[in-house]
Amino acid sequence: MIDTQPAPRYVPDSSDARPVISVVAPVYNEAATLPLFCERVIAALEPLREPFELVLINDGSRDGSLEVMVGLHERDPRIKVINFSRNFGHQIAITAGIDYARGAAVAVIDSDLQDPPEVIPELIAKWREGYGIVFAQRAEREGETWFKKATAAFFYRLIRRITNVNIPVDTGDFRLMDRKVVDTLRQMREHHRFMRGLSVWVGFKQTGVEYKRAPRHAGETKYPLSKMLRFALDGITSFSYLPLQLATYFGFLVAAISMVALIAVVILRLTGSQTNFYGQASTLVSVLFLGGIQLIFLGIIGEYLGRIYDEVKQRPLYIVADVLGLDETQDRRV
Ligand code: UDP
Ligand code: MG
């Protein structure tokens, strides 16, 4: 097991009753990073001289992250832990953190130290100016493959184009939200959650702060290509009907082309300039082409249908095995 560095025990005082700032961090197999992560968050927030809490969500880690978290909580009760019964995914983990956080402002940050905790005070400063949401925008990304950067750049621009929520380009989930925004988000219980879109959808005054995204401190990304694709699809289907409408547009296009072709065939027949039409191959190709297109659109309908099915089942978003330092009995939904 990874040893947590010996830090002085934190002794709570009465001002800790209700934190002003909550920091929410999802954790999936980050045992090697957690002690340093917590240390840096605390070092960034302590100079503000305001009560804060750091809510760690253990999203079914299998590398002893939980034990590290328990140790950190025992040493400093401002570190709180939500332990999921299994892995529910990054976005759901953030949701649980937001559900339990009690601060007047809630910051969401990755626990792999790609998002530097030192940026949080800058976000807080903007919040104090009266902004409801303050995004941390990636001005630079270090230590990530060109493939990840290129697909991310493409995706953020695509989603901006085809949806009617203006998700700022190059923002992840690293952001700070006012209590009003958080309470609204807590009412939105959809299953395929694209949190960065949902928080923009809520509205309020929004602004951004630029930062340099660091490479991972340890371990590797938990977003392989397949998960990234799923996530992208969640983002698109949550906010846009365009993929469904494409079938209509395409249908009109094909109908128009076939009308032109029909008229051409009749004219050619009547004028006798061409009496015979050859081409089994061309018939086959066009039938297969349209068959393929139809299957693609069936698949697109399936993507939406499956998501509707997941909503209808009304299963809980996540299952909490235990919590440390948080109120367990309160119903988290507003
Ligand atoms: N994470 C999680 N559950 C998951 C996958 C990831 O809680 O199923 C956490 C992970 O520990 C990290 C954050 O979500 O703090 C972002 O994940 P990751 O760094 O793997 O994504 P990337 O930065 O590569 O996009
Ligand atoms: Mg990361």
Image: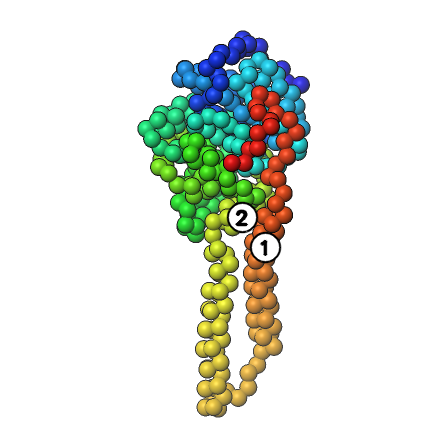
Looking at this view, name the residue that lies furthest to the top: 8
Percent coordinates x, y for residue 126 in the rendering: 35, 28
Front residue of 304 and 152:
304
Q: Residues within 10 Å of mark 2 (few under 14, many from 20)?
A: some
Q: From the image, state whether disc 1 or disc 2 is nearer to you.
A: 1
Front residue of 216 and 328:
328
Q: Quadrant of residue 317?
A: top right
Front residue of 139 and 230:
230
Provide the residue designation for mark 1. 305
Answer whether residue 333 is visible to the viewer in this image: yes
At mark 2, the secondary structure is helix
At a point 42% along the width and 41% down the height, the residue shown is 202
Percent coordinates x, y for residue 258 in the rendering: 49, 75
Along the polypeptide, which appears first: circle 1 or circle 2?
A: 2
Which three-letter amino acid code belongs to the residue tagged 1? Leu
Q: CA distance from mark 1 to mark 2?
A: 13 Å
Provide the residue designation for mark 2. 233
Answer whether residue 117 is visible to the viewer in this image: no
Front residue of 333 and 153:
333
296 above or below 126?
below
